[in-house]
Amino acid sequence: MYTLLLVEDEAMELLALKYAVSANFGDLFQIIEAADGNTALDLCEKYHPQLIIADINIPGITGLDLIEAVHKLDFDTAIIITTAYDKFGYIQRALEMGVNSYLLKPIDVRELNLAIQKCIRRLEEHRSRERQMSALMQDIESMRSYAKEYLVQDILDGNAPAEVLTSACGWPSDGALQLCLLCWIPQEQPDYNRFYEICEKQFRGYFSLLFSPLKDCGLLLLQACPGREPGALTLLLRLGAIHVLRSMEHGKIAGSGFFTSYDALSRGWTEFYSSALELKGAYSFPPISMGSLGTSHQRVLLRQKILQRLEARQTSSLISLLKKTAAASGSYWQTAALFLHALGRFDPSIPLIEVFKLCEQDRSWKSLSKWLEDYYHDHPVISDQEQAARSHIQRALTFMNQNYSQDLTMAGVAEELGLSATYFSNLFKRQTGKNFVTVLHEIRIRHAVAMMQQGEQDIEKIAVQCGYCSKKYFFEAFKRTTGQSVTQYRQGENK
């Protein structure tokens, strides 16, 4: 379907045009209309019609001025001009402006149809050329990607000059190069697409992905974005790698330091790739220089102090420690690295990269202090008494799930836990929000449903194995628990 703009200020002539187009071309055109040049130009900007039929003499800007303005909008369209005046000057100017046809009023329908058919052929030829060009560009891109993989490998192996990449692929020159390698080695069925998606999300705005060759691992060549500090990038690379391991579950990951020249990249490539494949543990990166933060033992002690303050929820004391450490060492990012390491040990579920970005946005530690207070508010400390109560109920539910087919009573389960029946009853209701009998029925009916889904047809057998002494009692419990009868449930299963 094409969009057709009709521009005519005479209502009857506009109606005749619409009728002629609809009668002879059916649903080929979506017709929009305007009674003046200014409205027509607005519609052109909004809809980019593929065909315009316009009268020269219209209110507002003239038809010829409209054509000139449309050409400036730079979209492809065919144009038919209509006029009641057979003036050579109009015709000459219209043809010079690239008008496809020129029709005199009153318009002959056969001439109109011929003019529209001519424009349709032109539009279809244009669409065909666009499809061919699109297919050609896809082929070229595929060939470029295919050639690029071998080209990058040759450069890594030292068999090709780096100038080829900088000129042909737009890679940074040596002076602007700040490139690192990230290698993920899967231990089970590899999902490389997910690996790349995770990395792209974590590193967006900090690194740009130059290349991702697929060997027997997931390998990324990452170029640092301009304006980012090396300390921040080094820390982010490590945090991103940890996130990959947590997200992918199975595998090992290794990272390189930053290369500032292609010669250094070529020299370091073989060693890095070999060590990545031989990786013993799950994680291997070059050490972050801690400078004046002291010896390795001193840094361990400092990390322990940070962890102790996190566990004690001493926000003010922790922020004071971080400020003093950063001031004494002269390195904000070394201090941030120690803090994030301790934070990951304190609660592995915390998204460390989000906290990293918070540290980057505000170096006064105020935002971090606010984040910690919010975290502690959302994760209140559970008292020993509350932990004991939860443990009792968890043990009770485990016992009920393991012995649901037996004749269970609340007093019997309380005795199994070493609690009084009254205390257990109150505790159970407070922790689960339901009484003991309701939960027991839910457990038994859940197992009954599982048996029916596995093909068991004998209702009496199901009832007995789920702890009910009769089918009648089972039917009542099933209806009360699920809201439908056994028959209704089975009919629903068979649909």
Image (cartoon, rainbow, N blue to C red):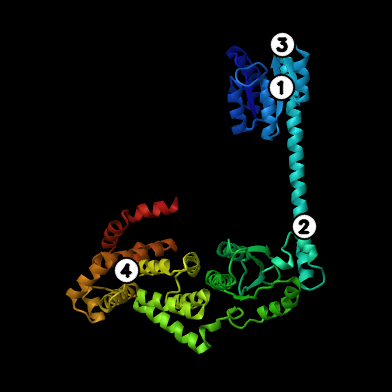
**In-front residue for pair 149/217:** 149
In whole angstroms, how far apart are the C-alphas of marks 4 and 2? Answer: 69 Å
Task: Tell which circle, 2 or 3, labels the residue nearer the N-terminal end.
Answer: 3
Query: Tag 4: Cα neighbours inside 10 Å, few (<14), some, or many (≥20)?
Result: some
Corner quadrant of residue 408 = bottom left
Q: Which residue is mark 4?
A: 464
Disc 4 versus disc 1: nearer the observer: 1
Q: Amino acid at mark 2?
A: Arg
Corner quadrant of residue 286 = bottom right
Q: Residue at x 32, y 68 (%)?
A: 464
Q: Which secondary structure lies at badge 4?
A: helix
- Classify residue 62 as left or right of residue 448: right
Q: Can you say whether 459 is above or below 281 in the image?
A: above
Query: Tag 3: Cα neighbours inside 10 Å, few (<14), some, or many (≥20)?
Result: few
Task: Tell which circle, 4 or 3, labels the residue nearer the N-terminal end.
Answer: 3
Which label belongs to residue 144? 2
Q: Which residue is mark 1?
A: 80
Task: Tell which circle, 4 or 1, labels the residue nearer the N-terminal end.
Answer: 1
